[in-house]
Image: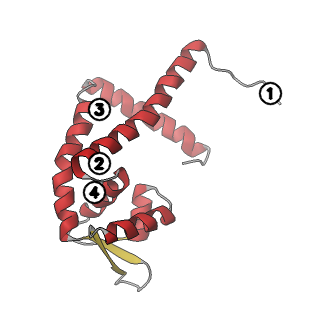
């Protein structure tokens, strides 16, 4: 077995910074959404994805693909959101298989109220802290890292 390619001190420092970001940013986003709108990141993601196809509905399988989540995760979350009155589910009209998801009036009210504060959080923490050039560099870097993960069939 070949010797591992250990990280240099500089790479170790960058890895730790990246790891802290990977763990910290989602937690900060969860706290912002919960504080400002009482939503989890998952709930907000579902409301945003379904609202993007308005005025229609979105099949639950397509929602899972859009969010890149396991179908079981989507199913559990949709059940909770339906019990809260945020979404409505019905049998898919096109083929009778699967479910179509649409926002209830309460769901529309919730996403309309939550979106401005959430977009403010994203703008202030991500975009305002980077120049336009840095934003483009970040886009390139993230694309390369995601591509390396996809090549390993882990995405």
Closer to the observer: label 2 or label 3? Answer: 2
SS under mark 2? helix
Q: Which numbered circle lies on residue 48?
A: 4
Q: Which mark is residue 34?
A: 2
To which quarter of the image does residue 63 belong? Answer: bottom left
Callout 4 secondary element: helix
Which residue, as the protein is rendered here, is positioned at the far top? 9
Camera-nearest label, 3 or 1:
3
Residue contact between numbered discs 1 and 4, judged by CB atoms under 8 Å: no
Q: Nearer the viewer, residue 72 or 59?
A: 72
The coloring applied to the image is: secondary structure
Residue tagged 1: 2
Comes first in the chain, label 2 or label 3: 2
Q: Which mark is residue 128?
A: none
Q: Residue at x 21, y 57 (%)?
A: 111
* Image position, residue 36 (x, y; %): 22, 46
Q: Earlier in the sequence, mark 2 or mark 4?
A: 2
Q: Are marks 3 and 4 in contact (CB under 8 Å)?
A: no
């Amino acid at each position: 077995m070949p010797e591992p390619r250990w990280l240099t001190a500089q790479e170790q420092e960058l890895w730790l910074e990246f790891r802290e970001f990977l763990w910290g940013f989602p937690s900060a986003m969860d706290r912002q959404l919960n504080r400002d709108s009482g939503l989890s990141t998952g709930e907000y993601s579902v409301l945003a994805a379904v609202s993007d196809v308005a005025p229609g509905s979105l099949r639950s399988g397509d929602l899972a693909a859009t969010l890149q989540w396991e179908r079981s995760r989507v199913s559990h979350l949709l059940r909770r959101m339906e019990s809260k009155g945020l979404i409505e589910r019905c049998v898919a009209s096109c083929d009778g298989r699967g479910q179509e998801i649409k926002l209830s009036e309460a769901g529309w009210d919730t996403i309309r109220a939550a979106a401005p504060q959430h977009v403010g959080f994203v703008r202030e923490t991500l975009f305002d802290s980077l120049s336009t050039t840095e934003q483009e560099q970040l886009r390139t870097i993230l694309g390369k890292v995601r591509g390396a993960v996809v090549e390993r069939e882990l995405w």
